[in-house]
Amino acid sequence: MLDEGQFSKFLPSGKFPPPDLIIRTGGTMRTSGYWLYDSEYSEWYFSDKYWPEFDAQELDKALEQFSGAIRNFGK
């Protein structure tokens, strides 16, 4: 029987833990199929800045938003 642990081994990201924070740049508010399975309990940060302009100040904003998130992991 295939369970969640076995299934995740077949994913390209299977050897890594699920991401806590996913940052999407360029003002696009969609996932584009990016880590759909692994992002079940991830927090998302959407930035209007494109990747070349994404700087330390914008990263601080993302981390500040993440630090205020109440994460209950589906409970």
Image (cartoon, helix red, strand yellow):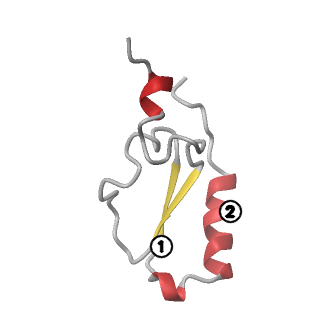
* Mark 1 or 2, nearer chain start: 1
Q: What element carries label 1?
A: loop
Vertically, is 17 above or below 54?
Answer: above
Q: Is residue 60 left or right of residue 25?
A: right
Which picture quadrant has residue 60? Answer: bottom right
Q: Going 67% across and 80% down the picture, which residue do you hit? A: 57
Vertically, is 20 above or below 28?
Answer: above
Name the residue beneath numbered marker 1. Answer: 47
Vertically, is 71 above or below 5?
Answer: below
Quarter of the image where the C terminus is located: top right
- Give amino acid for label 2: Glu
Quarter of the image where the N terminus is located: top left
Q: Is mark 2 on a helix, strand or loop?
A: helix
Q: How crowded is mark 2: few (under 14 residues within 10 Å), some or many (20 or more)?
A: few
Q: Going 37% across and 55% down the picture, which residue do you hit? A: 34
> Residue 20: x percent and y percent?
60, 48
35 or 27, nearer to the observer? 35
Name the residue beneath numbered marker 2. Answer: 64
Q: In this view, does 61 lie to the left or right of 13?
A: right
> Residue 3: x percent and y percent?
43, 18
Q: Is residue 2 left or right of residue 17?
A: left
- Give amino acid for label 1: Ser
Q: In this view, does 5 lie to the left or right of 62?
A: left
Q: Going 44% across and 48% down the picture, which residue do you hit? A: 12
